[in-house]
Image (cartoon, coloured by chain):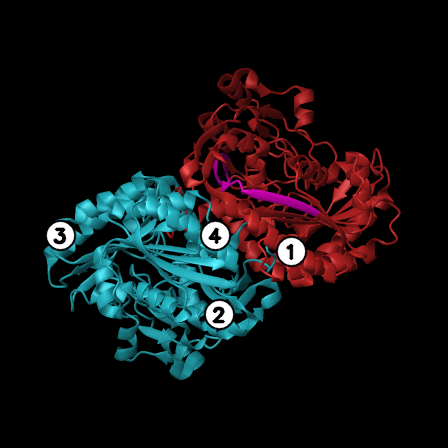
Chain colours: A red, B cyan
Amino acid sequence: MNNLPKSVRRPLPAESIPQFESLFGDRFVTSEAVRNHHGKDESPYPLCPPDAVIFPLNENEVVAAVKLCNRYGIPIVPFGIGSSLEGHVLPIQGGITLDFAQMNRVLSIDAEDFTVTVQPGVIRTQINEEIRHTGLFFPVDPGAHASIGGMTATRASGTNAVRYGTMRENVVSLKVVTAQGDIIRTSSRARKSSSGYDLTHLFVGSEGTLGIIVEITVRVYPLPESITAAVCNFPTLADAVQAVIEIMQSGTAIARVEFMDERAVNAVNRYSKLSLKETPLLLFEFHGSKSLVQEQAEIVQEIAREHGGVDFEWAERPEDRTRLWTARHNSHYSGLQLRPGARSVATDVCVPISRLADCVTATAEDLQHVPFPYTIVGHVGDGNFHVQMLIDPESETEWQMSEEINHRLVHRAIEMDGTCSGEHGVGIHKMEFLKVEHGEAALGLMRMIKHAFDPNNIFNPGKLVSWEA
Amino acid sequence: MNNLPKSVRRPLPAESIPQFESLFGDRFVTSEAVRNHHGKDESPYPLCPPDAVIFPLNENEVVAAVKLCNRYGIPIVPFGIGSSLEGHVLPIQGGITLDFAQMNRVLSIDAEDFTVTVQPGVIRTQINEEIRHTGLFFPVDPGAHASIGGMTATRASGTNAVRYGTMRENVVSLKVVTAQGDIIRTSSRARKSSSGYDLTHLFVGSEGTLGIIVEITVRVYPLPESITAAVCNFPTLADAVQAVIEIMQSGTAIARVEFMDERAVNAVNRYSKLSLKETPLLLFEFHGSKSLVQEQAEIVQEIAREHGGVDFEWAERPEDRTRLWTARHNSHYSGLQLRPGARSVATDVCVPISRLADCVTATAEDLQHVPFPYTIVGHVGDGNFHVQMLIDPESETEWQMSEEINHRLVHRAIEMDGTCSGEHGVGIHKMEFLKVEHGEAALGLMRMIKHAFDPNNIFNPGKLVSWEA
């Protein structure tokens, strides 16, 4: 298992504790069980609990907590459901975890404007349940049942991003509590604006390091008149990826296009009781009017065929589609079953689509002789893919090997003008790559922003960008 | 005419001049004609020339200029073609204007990745000429033949934004020269990334106040298989706007939907020798496959009819479409002809679409008794519209009246959860509204960024956000 970076914990000053207690009563919790629950996520790091957990009820309580933390220099880490993959929520300098479980209301549904405003603890599927009657839906769908606060903070995406964009494209406006304890709104709900610096995008992906997000307005979309999904098998990984490249280049407005290697298909078959043919495959979905969906599907089928795609199989009934996509969404968890008790290391790179086949192929070659199970899956329409490696938590060798593969993969992606993270974020695990990807000077600008917005380094310290150069 | 804000000019230190001369030779220009050319834009402000103009040939020359300016605290203002509307390029504190006329090359066309990389002096139409052979196009189309550098700096948009987004959605990556004289790249060319703070979006719309943009990578799109345009007349402005609202809500992926009031139609008829019926009208464009375009057009026609839309007239031949859209693009210039010699004051607000009819109607009422000609046009699919007021440049009364209308319009838009600028930017003219729109604390964060990135206040000083609170 990975070691946490060396950090000095900052214990809660004794005089701060009665103040937290008087503000939050029994929603200021220091029990070991609760602290431990907030000391882990889905990353390969050991337990790292906060000193206390606060469950705020509203934005004013967040302001009160932040003001107290800022006065005493206490770290404060926002927490959704703990599904982050790179150690984002581990309070490595101690302090307070702010759990948004009780700020989980959909505040307003503005169907005419295609926006919905929620509190950070709202789970992504909850939005869709609450807006179903409007004929609208929220498309961003990472594998986990993540919170909207967490998804905003990590700039998350998922299988619909190729058509509908990521959290970057789908967050309209935010309310944020600053280090000074002010509540700011980053933008109006207008569809476009040229009024001042883009604070919305600065907070999207800031991983809790610049302020605490307390309200999120997201875009929603009309449910398509018609939806069809399809599965298609390919002889090799390269064939499947090449087909995707050509589909993208054809300008077809495909809604989803996902890659799974034969190992991932095997895992999914076992976990979700499906009988997909165990070859590299692509999973498609088409949204639109009946005739448009038909038209798109024909183009895609033709391109797939040219690349050896066979057994094109349609899933038109909603229940079949749901089974298929649920299986895909669960691929992280089905992967875990390939080696019960193993620790999962999930990588995440994204490259320009012209380099995708090269990048995936070189990565598959690099993995050929590893002693542990792995799968390759990808949101390939975006040039984004993941390797999930199932390593023995007790084996230092396997850990080192997975780290080396991850390093080589990240450097390969960056050399191809890609990024060290397509959607999982930086957290602790990817901090070392930021200098390679962005360069010293750009990282310097990021650090300037951190210092300016958070002069006492209280907001999720030790994550994303290091405090010192 | 508007007075410029009171600013102290910072004269070029005598010892800096020979250094500029030795670096740039005859591309360091202090002649009155050239300085005057760089002392105006399309805003209602008097002439305000810089002390000198530099025409850099490459990014290293920009670095050299910035380093010298930073050492001596000399203001430096980037300049494209001078089509900004709110005083963005007026060097109100004197100093150097950096004219990008000679950095006007398309550097790379990555058709497979749907990206094109250009220098800041490239004009928007030039991209489309240079990529025509690829079957791709760049959609962002403000009224002026603006430079891509200027469009990036003001977060510009235009008639295609409703389908393809603004510069916010279409800038993939930037190269920027910082105050320290470093060249940074804000992002890779991957379609998505969760790697660090979003510097790209921070510089898009920063109006030259945070650094000098020296390279821009933009997204391009496959030319649609089929394009059809149409014009439709409406009895009243409110009917036309209500039709747009319903079209947007129907989820139809319309490519363009533009509003013109009867005055704008009259101006366009006269200027572009058209014979459009002089009522409020909507101008549509549909992109896609033949069947999709057909389908969209039918839906739109039906909704328009329900709101009294008549005389639906198609323009299927490319030359007819071009005439129509050229007329629309020239509406700023055709408006000018309504009162030869007049000064144009162009407003720009954007509201959530649900409030658009209210906002436009109240604005039209407010304009009923003004003594000068005006037109109302709008990118209404985005909730964005403009009033162009043609005022007597010698009349203080008319100037005051137009300012009051502008003030009331901006406050009306902000009260409706909209913005003081949909696409023109802040410049000098809209600075006072930022506090109303964003609040003191959010403006404080913007100021922190300005202070951190530009400690000597050299980058386009006195624009967008004031140096002091």
Locate residue B397 relative to residue B406 in the image: left or right. left
Residue A371, image x and y in percent? 89, 47
Sequence order check, earlier mark of 4 and 3: 4
Residue A197, image x and y in percent? 42, 51
Q: Chain of mark 1?
A: A
Locate residue A358 relative to residue A176 in the image: left or right. right
Same chain for marks 2 and 3? yes
Tag 1: residue type? Glu
Same chain for marks 4 and 2? yes
CA distance for labels 4 and 1: 18 Å
Q: Is residue B90 visible?
A: yes
In the picture, the quarter occupied by the N terminus of chain A is top right
Q: Chain of mark 4?
A: B
- Residue named by callout 2: B63
Mark on residue B370? 3
Q: Quick one: A89 or B348, which is closer to the camera?
A: B348
- Residue named by callout 4: B295
Q: Nearer the viewer, mark 1 or mark 3?
A: 1
